[in-house]
Amino acid sequence: MTPPSVVIEFSTPFAVFLGDITSETFAKTGLGLIRWRPGECVGQVRLSAATYDAGVPDLTAANARSQGARSLIVGSAAVGGGVPDAWVPALCDAARAGLDIVAGLHVRLASLPGLAAAAEQGGARLIDVRVPPAGIPVGTGIKRPGRRILTVGTDCACGKKYTALQLTEDLRRRGYAATFRATGQTGIMIAGRGIPIDAVVADFVTGAAEQLSPAADPSHWDVIEGQGGLFHPGYLQVSVGLLVGSQPDAFVVCHDPLRTHVAGWPTFPLPTIPQLVERTMQLGRLTNPGIRCVGVALNTSRIPAHERAALLAHHAEQTGLPCVDPLIDGTDAIVEHLEGLFS
């Protein structure tokens, strides 16, 4: 059964538009595409030197077009999912230059002043990613065949998508049938399909999660990209719906060890990893009594190299689970633990 996913087809090569973003956290859409579709990215378009640098060539829209780019992807994942007024002229210039504009924001591109006219003038398309498919049902809670693993996080933007992508790669390399199930705008753009869970009406979130990961062969693994966080004061609702609807057999906790408080909500401290494991188990048992945690994924990209091993060992000892940085170590240790539990 093919789930009623959003299918995204945008022209490549592409450039990433970072506007005036200064935070790595809010540049995660652009960074994800650069990391997972590197051969198709010609560079970045920034509005000033103070904008976050994703480490690819700086271009203007005209430069990008002359170097073969066919799409400009809005790389923002800012709170609220909007487009600042200061960005609109640059997006209009890009559309007039003939670049398709692709965005996974809550605002529709055609609603931005002058952008639809600029796109018509340049023969460009406006492609909105964050639009859920029609006909999503209310969740049933009925267990379905197939295996599922969900990434959960102590916060937003702490590695859930990257961990899920790496897990999918490593499962396949070890001979398993595995499918990455995208639930956010960046994941959908990387995979080419998925359901933007945070754009689904609340009553249908669990149903969307069920549809995203339908009944499958008992040995097949769906690797589901997590969203939000169960301790997040703004986004916990999407996390709960995704957890209950996904009915995961296993989950991996993702965490940024340098972060102490919820990003953008400085008065809310992050939960500990054991606290998150406990809450995930408590809620997940509603639809899958056999749910269990199978590993911890840390983002150690900003940890000094000589401190990495001790940090990973600390969390492994604290939880009794394999602990890795997926982008440095891979996830084989987690997959091997999974094999021991579900063989």
Image (tube, rainbow, N blue to C red):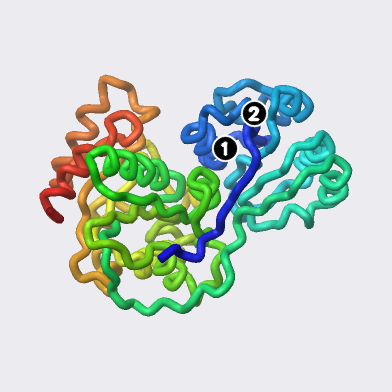
Percent coordinates x, y for residue 53 in the rendering:
59, 26
Mark 1: few, some, or many residues within 10 Å (few <14, many ≥20)? many
Could you say which quadrant of the image residue 171 lies in? top left
Q: Which residue is mark 1?
A: 30
Numbered badge on residue 314 = none
Percent coordinates x, y for residue 207 in the rendering:
44, 73
Q: Which residue is mark 2?
A: 44
Q: Residue placed at 26% from the left, 27% from the top?
A: 308
Percent coordinates x, y for residue 200 in the rendering:
54, 67
Q: CA distance from mark 2 to mark 1?
A: 9 Å
The kind of residue tagged 1 is Gly
Q: 140 or 107, which lies in front?
A: 140
Q: Are marks 2 and 1 in contact (CB under 8 Å)?
A: yes
Q: Residue placed at 63% from the left, 32% from the top?
A: 13
Q: The residue tagged with tag 1: helix, strand or loop? A: helix
- Residue 298 position (above or below residue 2): above
Q: Residue placed at 32% from the left, 36% from the top?
A: 326
Mark 2: few, some, or many residues within 10 Å (few <14, many ≥20)? many
Q: How many marks?
A: 2
- Residue 285 position (above or below residue 320): below
Give the quadrant of the N terminus.
bottom left
